[in-house]
Image: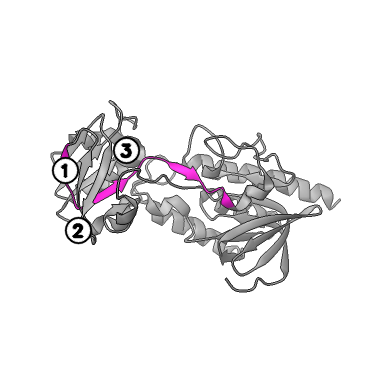
Amino acid sequence: MGKTKSNVSFDVVIIGAGPAGLCAAIYFKRAGITPLILEASAPGGTLNKTHKIENYPGYQDGDGSTLAFRMYSQVEELSVPFKTEKVIDIEKENDDYVIITENNRYKTSYILIATGKTPRKLEATNAGEYENKGISYCAVCDGALYKGKDVIVVGGGNSAMEAADYMSDIANKVYIVNRSDTLKADEKEKEVIKRKNVEVILNAKVKKVIGDKEKVTSVILDNNEKINTSAIFVCIGQESNAAYYQNLSLDSDGKGIIVDDNMKTSCNNVYAAGDSVSKDLYQVVTATSEGAIAATNIIKKIRKSNG
């Protein structure tokens, strides 16, 4: 790690460039406040790994990466500063905060946490050994590598059905392996199981991953059934990206950061929005609305403090 540079100050720093962070940036800039966006990877977050977006008003029959690009383009046209840097720590400094990345330090009065979540890992023997060698957490990203092959999708929610839908057009056979006796996905999403090359296996978990050191070749389920497969697409939920804000001691639960109706956390002048917060509905439409709510309330506080 290189030596970090001295503090650069911003009124607001948005950590994460998914729908919540990008929407907030638009509201800030239109209010005359220029935020800094820090994003560890590509703008759009989970949108980039979403095959179809069918429940976001005004956006029909499009994929997630296209919507992500449009959101980011709108922010870019507003000349909002954007840095591709991973946040590794946040320190309190009097009434302000210092956000530390691998190369820089940014001082700010307000923080909006919008980093979303990361995929929950597959808990099976040898799973770690075969990540990126057949085990994938993004069908849209890696599916084309398995054209004409047999693949497994692990999970029973909407994301699993979306992955199965995407892979059913590419793969020879798609097995959906779900640990419970029902699929919890929406009825429309579950229509994929009617396809001829899709087979659902309920009340089962992947117990062991088998391969030749270079790639996945099969799995053993907990009922000892063996399934030959070239890939395992894991869609079993997500976990909060919590490491970098541990010093803030934010109130949280098993689902994420606890916020009030204004999207404020338990820490003064720290807000959160999108998939990083604790809530019941994790969707693009809720993320954008939360980003707007958080930004609007921060704008009010900045204007009040400026007189």
Residue at the spot 25% in from the left edge and 33% down from the top edge: 204
Nearer the observer: mark 3 or 1; the answer is 1
Residue 17 falls left or right of residue 251: left
What distance separates the C-alpha of mark 3 from that of mark 1?
16 Å
Per the rendered image, the range of residues in magenta is 225-243
Residue at the spot 63% in from the left edge and 42% down from the top edge: 293
Alpha-carbon neighbours of circle 3 within 10 Å: few (<14), some, or many (≥20)?
many
What residue sits right under mark 2 in the picture?
212
**Residue 48 appears in which quarter of the rendering?**
bottom left
Task: Tell me residue 129's x, y (percent).
Answer: 31, 55
**Residue 164 appears in which quarter of the rendering?**
top left
The disc, 2 or 1, on the residue closer to the chain's N-terminal end is 2
Alpha-carbon neighbours of circle 2 within 10 Å: few (<14), some, or many (≥20)?
few
The disc, 3 or 1, on the residue closer to the chain's N-terminal end is 3
Amino acid marked by disc 2? Asp
Task: Tell me residue 9's x, y (percent).
Answer: 73, 64
What distance separates the C-alpha of mark 3 from that of mark 2?
25 Å
Amino acid marked by disc 3? Gly
Number of residue marks = 3
Pick the residue in front: 270 or 307: 270
Residue 106 falls left or right of residue 41: right
Residue 240, magenta (yes or no): yes
Q: Which mark is residue 20?
A: none
Q: Which mark is residue 155?
A: 3
Amino acid marked by disc 1? Ile
Judging from the image, what secondary structure is the residue with disc 2 in?
A: loop
Alpha-carbon neighbours of circle 1 within 10 Å: few (<14), some, or many (≥20)?
some
Task: Tell me residue 118's x, y (percent).
Answer: 46, 49
Q: Which quadrant of the figure contains the N terminus? A: bottom right
Q: Which mark is residue 227?
A: 1
Task: Tell me residue 142's x, y (percent).
Answer: 29, 57
What distance separates the C-alpha of mark 2 from that of mark 1?
15 Å
